[in-house]
Image (cartoon, grey):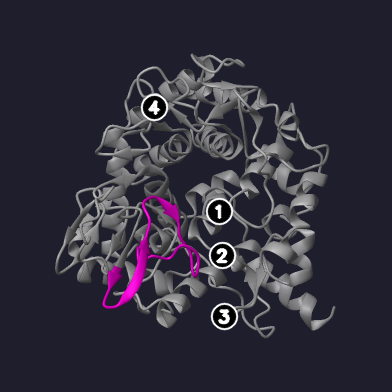
């Protein structure tokens, strides 16, 4: 056994893999007690989900407190949050079970079909946004492969957690299987190759954009590969990975890794999938796993804030984090003789649409990857920008650079002439990763139960993953 193989094997057994100078294993989540401030953040953020999600339907809104539509992805997060709330004593098992069952029943019974109105989905997939009152398609949003995958992942986790003989828990398990089983994943491969489309509109057909390059789509392809009824070919994974070298690989700002500028791309699939120590053929060749990749991406975000090439206010070793989030609005402004362009909701990242807007979820939801830099960041944001921290945890984003709108109308939030811009909303898909990844860091709960899910295991193995817990 050569030294490289020995290190890979040893680190995989420990839960992470790193070939940083053929050195030590990556930092991994270790179950234990939480820092009190992190524990409080997790509970406050959980309370947002519990308070804004209608008990009868489980249709978690995209955002609050403004009136909003339902985000299907946020429902997947909510279904994952309820067991976390039970385990932490914030709600009872009966409360979590009933809300979970209500949600499962709603999505199982929701109408499906090719019509543009009056349906929740088609071919087993669900629309990105749904009306809060009816659960039908909102506006002209797309039938979304990624949002469906995020919802299904939450359902499968709920099915693993609610494992008792209670009839409601048995029904939860049955409905989760049924909703997952009817998703026709091969239908979403319309290009004559193995690529999976991002979505479909009843008015115009399939979206021309497909999943390629490293991003949040790992969970999409794994759910498609693991389907017990409508699986795609393993070629879907190899085809996707074939785009990594040209679209994603970087050696900037730290150790080489697969780059995706907004941090959510390094977090979403990891909410449910424990990538520590398991390797697909691509990462086996690189010598480290996807967990280590996200750890490196987390450090790269910190390094970018330290470097601060844009000269934005507030960026530092301890205050950092760029991802998809709300922003002040879409306008250009001269600040101290420098033209600055600002955006409303946008996917921000190092060097990409960076307008000085910091999203606490970018760091907080990376806690399982690099707690040693995330915890100080969370504490620093709370201490230096207390206006961002509220009853439900962090507001979605803030921008210390923007202290005057120059007469431009804000689309979100408000500006303080001394403190800068602060959002006035919470977004479900930014709140969810905070709750879930803090729990994975603390107790391994979601990862531990999903390691027992036969569908996820099948998807990983068909993608070519091996080692670590897959070999146990």
Tell me, yes or no, whether the highlighted magenta stretch contains residue 288.
no
The answer to whether any part of residue 89 appears in the image is no
Q: Earlier in the sequence, mark 2 or mark 4?
A: 4
Tell me the number on the disc at residue 254: 3
Q: Earlier in the sequence, mark 4 or mark 1?
A: 4
Q: Quadrant of the N terminus?
A: bottom right
Which residues are drawn in magenta? Answer: 334-358
Report x, y in % for residue 176.
Answer: 56, 27
Using the image as rendered, state which of residue 235 and residue 370 is in the foreground.
235
The overriding secondary structure of the stretch rendered in magenta is loop
Crowd class of label 3 (few under 14; some 14 to 19; many from 20; radius 10 Å): some
Residue depicted at 59% across the width and 78% down the height: 252
| CA–CA distance in space, label 4 to label 1 | 23 Å
Look at the numbered discs 3 and 1 and tell me whether their residues touch, using CB distance below 8 Å.
no
349 w.r.t. 183: above or below: below
Q: From the image, tell me which residue sits under label 1.
A: 270
């Amino acid at each position: 056994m050569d030294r490289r193989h020995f290190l890979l094997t040893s680190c995989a057994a420990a839960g992470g893999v790193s070939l940083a100078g053929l050195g030590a294993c990556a930092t991994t989540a270790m179950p234990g007690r939480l820092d009190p401030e992190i524990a409080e953040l997790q509970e406050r953020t959980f309370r947002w989900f519990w308070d804004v999600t209608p008990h009868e339907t489980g249709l978690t809104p995209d955002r609050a407190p403004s009136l909003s539509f339902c985000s299907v992805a946020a429902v997947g997060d909510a279904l994952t949050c309820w067991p976390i709330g039970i385990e932490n004593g914030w709600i009872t098992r009966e409360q979590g079970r009933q809300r979970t069952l209500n949600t499962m029943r709603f999505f199982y019974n929701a109408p499906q079909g090719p019509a543009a109105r009056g349906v929740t989905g088609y071919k087993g997939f669900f629309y990105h946004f749904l009306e809060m009152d009816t659960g039908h398609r909102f506006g002209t949003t797309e039938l979304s492969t990624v949002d469906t995958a995020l919802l299904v992942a939450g359902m499968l986790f709920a099915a693993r957690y609610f494992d008792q003989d209670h009839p409601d828990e048995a029904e939860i398990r049955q409905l989760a299987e049924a909703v997952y089983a009817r998703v026709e994943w091969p239908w979403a491969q319309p290009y004559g190759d193995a690529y999976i489309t991002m979505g479909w509109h009843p008015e115009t057909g399939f979206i021309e954009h497909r999943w390629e390059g490293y991003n949040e789509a790992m969970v999409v392809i794994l759910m498609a590969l693991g389907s017990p009824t409508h699986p795609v070919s393993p070629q879907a994974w190899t085809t996707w990975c074939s785009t990594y070298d040209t679209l994603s690989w970087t050696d900037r700002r730290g150790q080489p890794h697969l780059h995706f500028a907004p941090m959510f791309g390094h977090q979403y699939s990891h909410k449910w999938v424990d990538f520590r120590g398991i390797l697909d053929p691509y990462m086996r060749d690189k010598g480290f796993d996807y967990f280590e990749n996200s750890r490196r991406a987390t450090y790269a975000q910190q390094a970018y804030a330290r470097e601060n090439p844009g000269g934005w206010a507030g960026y530092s070793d301890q205050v950092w984090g760029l991802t998809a989030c709300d922003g002040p609005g879409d306008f250009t402004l001269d600040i101290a003789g420098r033209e600055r362009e600002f955006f409303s909701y946008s996917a921000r990242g190092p060097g990409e649409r960076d307008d000085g807007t910091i999203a606490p979820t970018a760091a907080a939801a990376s806690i399982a990857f690099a707690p040693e830099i995330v915890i100080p960041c969370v504490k620093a944001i709370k201490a230096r920008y207390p206006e961002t921290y509220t009853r439900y945890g962090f507001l979605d984003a803030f921008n210390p650079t923007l202290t005057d709108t120059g007469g431009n109308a804000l689309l979100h939030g408000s500006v303080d002439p001394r403190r800068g811009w602060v959002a006035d909303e919470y977004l479900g898909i930014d709140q969810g990763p905070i709750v879930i990844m803090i729990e994975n860091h603390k107790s391994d709960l979601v990862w531990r139960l999903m390691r027992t899910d036969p569908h996820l295991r099948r998807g990983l193995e068909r993608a070519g993953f091996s080692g670590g817990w897959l070999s146990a």
